[in-house]
Amino acid sequence: MTFRVQKSVRFHHCDPAGIVFYPQYFVMFHELLEDWFTDGLGIRYSELIGNQRRGIPTVKMDVDFIQASKLGDLLTFSLVVVKVGGSSIALRLSAEKDGAPCVRIEQVIVLCDLDSLKPVRVDNVLRKKMLGFSLPG
């Protein structure tokens, strides 16, 4: 199953040319991760960070910018889980406009303790929830 959310390109995302300034994509993709935890996995992101003291820093990211996005565009952001390791989660993320790809990302995040900054094992309950967003096969 794929997790999807729609987001509008707003003025604050854009450079003077009226297209998304590339670092803003990373902000929008992080919002996608927060939405996935809250709405897809049933774990409020604020609870994960605040009370559980768990974070998901990025340890690897490969990005392809395919097509510019413009002010006012409605983008569909998608997330698919590629693999869940001991503490790492490999993700495939994308943003599309009308079915045409704008950005594709291969990203690896690591579940970590925010106090020690050490990796934390993904427990079986969370692993099962995450793998519900992997592609069959």
Image: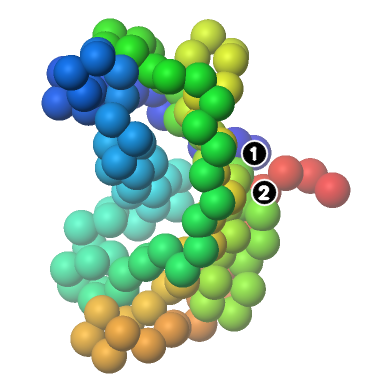
Q: Is residue 7 above or below residue 22?
A: above
The image's mark for residue 134 is: 2
CA distance for labels 2 and 1: 6 Å
Callout 1 secondary element: loop
* Residue visible at 30% across and 41% down in the picture: 23
Could you say where residue 1 lies in the image, as x and y percent from the top left?
64, 38
Which amino acid type is marked by label 1? Answer: Met
The mark nearer the N terminus, 2 or 1, is 1
Mark 2 is surrounded, within 10 Å at the Cα level, by few (under 14), some (14 to 19) or many (20 or more) other residues, namely some
> Which one is nearer the viewer's eye here, 21 or 114?
21
Color encoding of the figure: rainbow
Which amino acid type is marked by label 2? Answer: Ser
Residue 136 in view in this figure: yes
Q: Is residue 73 above or below residue 113?
A: above
Callout 2 secondary element: loop
Hey, which quadrant is residue 114 in on the image? bottom left
Could you say where residue 45 lies in the image, as x and y percent from the top left?
28, 56
Q: Is residue 126 above or below residue 17?
A: below
* Residue visible at 67% across and 48% down in the picture: 134
Q: Is residue 114 left or right of residue 132?
A: left
* Residue visible at 50% across and 82% down in the picture: 121
Hey, which quadrant is residue 50 in on the image? bottom left
Contact? badges 2 and 1 (CB < 8 Å) = yes
Could you say where residue 92 lies in the image, as x and y percent from the top left?
59, 46
Please give the residue where the numbered disc 1 appears in the rendered image: 1
Residue 125 in view in this figure: no
